[in-house]
Image (spheres, grey):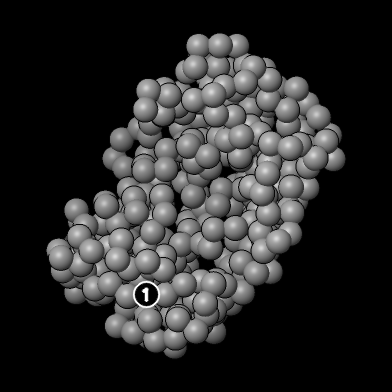
Amino acid sequence: MPKIGIFPAAGGLGSSIIDHLVQRVPADQLILIARKPDSLAELSRQGAAVRRADYEDPSTLDRVFDGVDVLMLISYASFEIQYRVEAHQAAIDCARRSGVKHIFYSSLAFGGDLADTSVAHVMGAHLRTERYLAELQAQGHITYTAIREGLYSESFPIYTAWFDLADPVDEITIPHDGSPPGVTWAKRDELGEATANLVAAYVQNPDTNSLSFPYVNRVLLLSGPRAYSLRETVEILGRAVGKEVRIREISTGEYAALPTHGDKHTYHGVDLAREWATAWEAIQHGETAVVSPLLGELLGREPEDYETTIRGLARE
């Protein structure tokens, strides 16, 4: 059976993919690659191979993908563009040199209905990585599937000026008035489950000409079942905490100057708060409002709605 590599085998999405994948393929079919391999001790005991590599230390990527046939590449956690692209390309190049045949890549659900442009700064590195994979495929080096993972329901804080369910405020100040179009929020664990189903389906049908896996050399969109305006999003947060919460629109400059950010928008010493604010511009343009049925099809059920997920988080 083909060997499946997952890198990084950590974080919310990566851990979810692994949890669901080990229910679909034997653990000894997995090669798990992480910055802290000790965290994977239980999976190692189950038979998974565990290796160390780190996006931030490119030398660790050399030969780490040896023996991997299919790689699930999870994007570097940042919204820088150039640094992030270089990290992705380094991993992809090492994977190709190690003989990886197919790469699944976790992209992001900006860009509307699979457009190849976006006004969201956070999408820049994803688009360039998608293009790089397509270029390598055109040269005959690899095949790929890029998965634009829906905006996590659990990621609401970064779109609501760090709203905290445990310490709620009654006013959210962002550069957006809350009106439609909105966001097709998706539960992170369901995205992980659907992604694991894609990977498992591929390794069980590795013939790229087979109609049984129609997602080779394609970009896919996984979304929640409906779009919620940011006003609806905030109203749901308010109901979950039992208080009225409203949006007050501010300018991008005012948002960038908010003291509540701390270093949350800072990467490698650079404050990217203004760049992050382009996410709201993209939401205004409808880039995150496209509903795709694919998540539900891969799950075999209706995806969980945003309010159900938020209520669950509020009870924790």
Q: Amino acid at mark 1?
A: Arg
Relative to residue 151, is residue 265 drawn left or right? Answer: right
Q: Nearer the viewer, residue 73 or 252?
A: 252
In percent of the image, x 46 and y 62: which residue is there?
Answer: 74
Q: Look at the image and tell me whether residue 72 can be seen.
A: no
Q: Quadrant of the C terminus?
A: top left
Q: Is residue 24 above or below residue 91?
A: above
Q: Is residue 168 above or below residue 3?
A: above
Q: How many labels were placed on the picture?
A: 1
Relative to residue 10, is residue 3 drawn left or right? Answer: left
Residue 283, position in %: x, y? 68, 38
Relative to residue 271, is residue 144 drawn left or right? Answer: left
In percent of the image, x 19 and y 74: which residue is there?
Answer: 1
Element assignment for label 1: strand
Residue 135, position in %: x, y? 58, 77
**Crowd class of label 1 (few under 14; some 14 to 19; many from 20; radius 10 Å):** some
Q: Is residue 197 above or below residue 59?
A: above
Residue 260, position in %: x, y? 69, 36
Q: Is residue 64 above or below residue 34?
A: below
**Residue, far top:** 243
Residue 258, position in %: x, y? 76, 36
In percent of the image, x 41 and y 65: which residue is there?
Answer: 8
Q: Nearer the viewer, residue 279 or 285?
A: 279
The residue that mark 1 highlights is: 52
Q: Look at the image and tell me whether residue 59 can be seen.
A: yes
Quadrant in the picture for residue 251: top right
In percent of the image, x 32 and y 68: which residue is there?
Answer: 37
Q: Nearer the viewer, residue 44 or 176?
A: 44
